[in-house]
Amino acid sequence: MRPRQAIPRLASAAFTSFVELPPVHRLLREGVSESFRQYDRELAWPDAEFFIDQAPPRIWGGVGGDSYTGWIYQQGFFAALIKSHVAGRSLSIVDFGCGYGKLAPVSTFFTGPDGRYLGIDIRQDCVDFCSRHYAALPRVAFHRSGDYNGMYSESRSAELAQSTPEREWPVAPGSVDLVLSVSVFTHLQERQALHYIEAIHRILKPGGLAMLTFHVVEEPRKPPRFRSPDKPHLLELFDFRTALPPSGFFFTSSPQTPEDAIAVNDAGLHLLIDGRFELVSLLRGSTTGGEDPFFQDIAILKKPV
């Protein structure tokens, strides 16, 4: 992880990292987190206890940083989304950019009895944490890829910067029913995004689905549709005004470190999917002014049969 002083102001405000906090603050947050977990568990509906027990102590981390409400809301949202679009059981699921494993507990409802969930992340600390924290979950595994990202990579080595997912993902071609990727393409420049979309296409079975989140901007631009007025830094973070090469279809709000937040326009989205996928649905989230009940835009893609 980059030193805190190297993180631009906007990204720092939006993604304050748990692991960068002073030890005393970390202990305080862990204590508050555990107290909330115990109290919440006492009041929860019995079926919710599973999700409360799986919520990790690093829930307020910079990689997928969140709250208990946001964490469990997203688990429920994607569980409903998967159930609505993917038929059958024993699914093979790849979660690209799994972070601290938010969707690992959800996967167990869909992988039994003979499927599997593989969480892939570029950060070794995330993979190590998930491997320990979710060790008791059935049909779950994690893998660190050597892929590179300007915001989240722990190393800036030339080898990682030139690495491609095709040689880094331990997944057989045409073997996966569902690829999930939450808040990953929102940090990818065009060359990387094209690499990853090709890798996702390669590993999916014919008829397989990908559920990928984006910031998809429209013209004229719509402001974010946040219900909370007290987070002005987020209005700046999602003000995508700087076009990125080579196509100019990708945009950032942070020219110094573009990967802090990246959007695509309609042409950029079609650059990624045309000739590879059918667009089943596009849910329009609040960061780009949409009305659907999620934060980012979610593209549901189908690999043609």
Image (cartoon, rainbow, N blue to C red):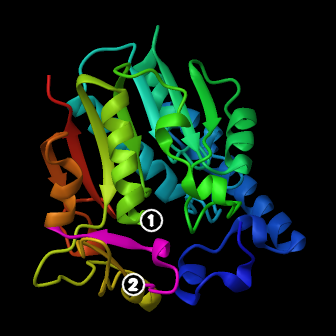
Q: Residues within 10 Å of mark 1 (few under 14, many from 20)?
A: many
- As drawn, the label of residue 138 is none
Residue beneath the point at 85% across and 75% down:
22
Label 2: which secondary element: loop
Task: Kindly indicate the quadrant of the structure image that contains residue 180.
Answer: top left
Image quadrant where one finds the C terminus: top left
- As drawn, the label of residue 187 is 1
Residue beneath the point at 55% across and 27% down:
170
Residue type at tag 2: Ser
Q: Nearer the viewer, residue 147 or 217?
A: 147
Residue 175 visible to an observer of this rendering = yes
Gap in angstroms between the C-alphas marked 2 and 1: 11 Å
The earlier-in-sequence mark between 2 and 1 is: 1
Label 1: which secondary element: helix
Q: Position of residue 298 (x, y in %)?
A: 27, 53
Instruction: Classify residue 247 as left or right of residue 132.
Output: left
- Magenta-colored span: 253-266
Which residue corresponds to mark 2? 253
Asked if residue 256 lies in the magenta stretch, the reply is yes
Residue beneath the point at 30% across and 43% down:
211
Task: Kindly indicate the quadrant of the structure image that contains residue 80.
Answer: top left
Residue beneath the point at 14% across and 42% down:
275
Q: Position of residue 93 (x, y in %)?
A: 42, 28
Image quadrant where one finds the N terminus: bottom right
Instruction: Examine the rendered structure and indicate whether residue 158 appears above or below residue 259.
Output: above
Q: Nearer the viewer, residue 183 or 225?
A: 183
The answer to whether the residues at label 2 and label 1 have Cβ atoms under 8 Å apart is no
Instruction: Classify residue 160 as left or right of residue 208.
Output: right
Q: Position of residue 258 (x, y in %)?
A: 46, 77
